[in-house]
Image: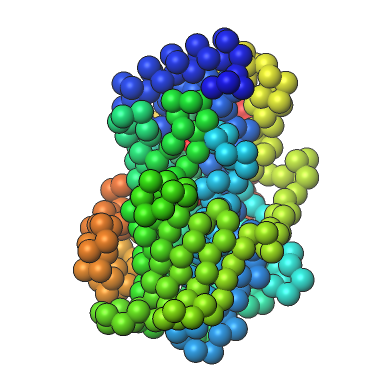
């Protein structure tokens, strides 16, 4: 912990002691000030599409096998942003802000060839915390939607996190769906005060066209001396024949091979990310993340931790009041863009196909679409989205905003 001052060192030590008796609720964990991020978890949905050109690439492939490979390539390219972009200087992962119910993160990417890709991310549940998102590119007919929460535990000085929830990708031109499971992870470097994410176990991508991609993660000391490693295979579901193998480091480069022949490769160096466009604070809805947390973020910037706590409590208390009032009035909070379902047919079908292969690689299909873990199975509600856009829901939205602002 060389780079931290004496006081920080003792704060860190007591923080480590405090998480030793950690109850699994990440939100309730009080981290020392220097580890607090100004970014809310609702923003993390954007990590899926910082390479819009790779996101839409599968739509251009006529061959289903090539399409499945393009989906795998895009997925692998998202891992760096998802799991290490907050830790550019390795070991500087920070604790995100815990989103409030209804919190939004909206934006769009503009890319020369990919065109416009839109992002709608919403905190759809607070207990347990669940974020849902929809990311779509109309020009290329590619849609991603998903929702996720975390289950954490602490043992032998690491925080281990299982993700609950799923993502599905739809490609209009081929009416094709891909089910994507989320990897488990743990935090390394805690003892040294230099936390970073390492992925573990596996991810599965099952397509409705009958292809299955399996990604196995490995950290330092496993397979190789490098951190953030993986190997992936693409097969026809149920077949033993391996069509492609992909391996490398998800923070850096990977190669795609057919047999022993390298057919493609990817390096983050050659693929700069496309920045997300978001509205100016003053034009944002009061429920939009950056606007809602602006005072907290400013306090963190100023290094004023008393003020940080104060501003945070203001939001948290207002939320508690709001829930109380909703209970009294018998009118629960209504999600702006998403609807919760008890079952999702698209997901069920793909899960059924992939289930036995998932068990083999340590992913349990049963927990994946268990609505009790995420307060429902969340789907993007296009009707709600259109109604918000056309102003049809103005009255409802105004009321919601007013209740939050009060
Ligand atoms: C969904 C992602 C998720 C969210 C984060 C575990 C974690 C919160 C959840 C799973 C995204 O698509 C991908 C990336 C990183 C995950 C975060 C990494 C992390 O450390 C936090 C937890 C809550 C902490 O902040 C623990 C504190 C840590 C920084 C050490 C003090």
Residue 20, compared with residue 365, is above or below; it is: above
Q: Quadrant of residue 269?
A: bottom right
Residue 378 x, y percent position in the rendering: 41, 56
**In this orientation, does residue 331 appear?**
no
Residue 33 x, y percent position in the rendering: 57, 20
Residue drawn at x 70%, y 54% is 276
Comparing 231 with 289, the one in front is: 231
Residue drawn at x 44%, y 25% is 191
Comparing 235 with 115, the one in front is: 235
Q: Quadrant of residue 126?
A: top left
Work out which quarter of the rendered image holds the C terminus and state it: top right
Residue 313 x, y percent position in the rendering: 55, 21
Residue 288 x, y percent position in the rendering: 64, 43
Residue 124, compared with residue 321, is above or below; it is: below
Comparing 286 with 98, the one in front is: 98
Work out which quarter of the rendered image holds the N terminus and state it: top right
Comparing 295 with 65, the one in front is: 65
Q: How is the image coloured?
A: rainbow
Q: Is residue 37 left or right of residue 185?
A: right
Residue drawn at x 72%, y 51% is 278
């Amino acid at each position: 912990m060389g780079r931290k001052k004496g006081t920080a060192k003792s704060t860190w030590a007591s923080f480590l002691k405090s998480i030793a008796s950690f109850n699994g609720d990440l939100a309730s964990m009080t981290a020392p000030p220097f580890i607090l991020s100004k970014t809310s978890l609702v923003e993390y949905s954007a990590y899926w599409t910082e390479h819009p050109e790779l996101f839409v690439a599968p739509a251009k492939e006529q061959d289903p096998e090539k399409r499945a490979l393009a989906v795998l390539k895009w997925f692998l390219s998202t891992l760096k942003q998802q799991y290490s972009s907050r830790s550019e200087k390795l070991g500087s992962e920070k604790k995100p802000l815990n989103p409030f119910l209804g919190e939004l993160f909206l934006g769009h990417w503009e890319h020369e060839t990919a065109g416009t890709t839109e992002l709608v991310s919403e905190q759809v549940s607070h207990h347990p915390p669940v974020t849902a998102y929809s990311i779509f590119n109309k020009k290329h007919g590619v849609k991603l939607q998903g929702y996720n929460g975390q289950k954490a535990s602490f043992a032998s000085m690491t925080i281990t996190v299982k993700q609950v929830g799923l993502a599905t990708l739809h490609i209009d031109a081929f009416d094709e769906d891909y089910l994507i499971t989320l990897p488990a992870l743990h935090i390394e470097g805690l003892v040294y005060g230099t936390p970073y994410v390492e992925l573990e176990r596996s991810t599965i991508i099952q397509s409705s066209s009958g292809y299955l991609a399996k990604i196995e993660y490995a950290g330092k000391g496993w397979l190789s001396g490098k951190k953030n490693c993986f190997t992936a295979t693409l097969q026809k579901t149920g077949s033993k024949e391996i069509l492609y193998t992909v391996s490398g480091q998800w923070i850096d480069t990977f190669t795609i091979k057919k047999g022993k022949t390298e057919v493609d490769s990817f390096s983050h160096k050659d693929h700069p990310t496309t920045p997300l466009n978001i509205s100016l604070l003053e034009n944002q809805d009061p429920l939009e993340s950056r606007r809602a947390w602006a005072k907290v973020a400013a306090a963190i910037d100023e290094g004023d931790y008393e003020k940080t706590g104060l501003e945070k409590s203001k939001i948290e208390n207002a939320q508690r009041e709001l829930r109380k009032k909703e209970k009294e009035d018998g009118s629960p909070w209504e999600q702006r863009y998403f609807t919760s379902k008890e079952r999702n047919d698209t997901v069920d079908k793909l899960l059924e196909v992939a289930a036995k292969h998932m068990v083999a690689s340590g992913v349990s299909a049963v927990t994946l679409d268990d609505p009790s873990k995420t307060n429902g199975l969340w789907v993007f509600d296009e009707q709600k989205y259109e109604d918000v856009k056309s102003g049809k829901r103005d009255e409802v939205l105004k009321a919601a905003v007013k209740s939050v602002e009060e």
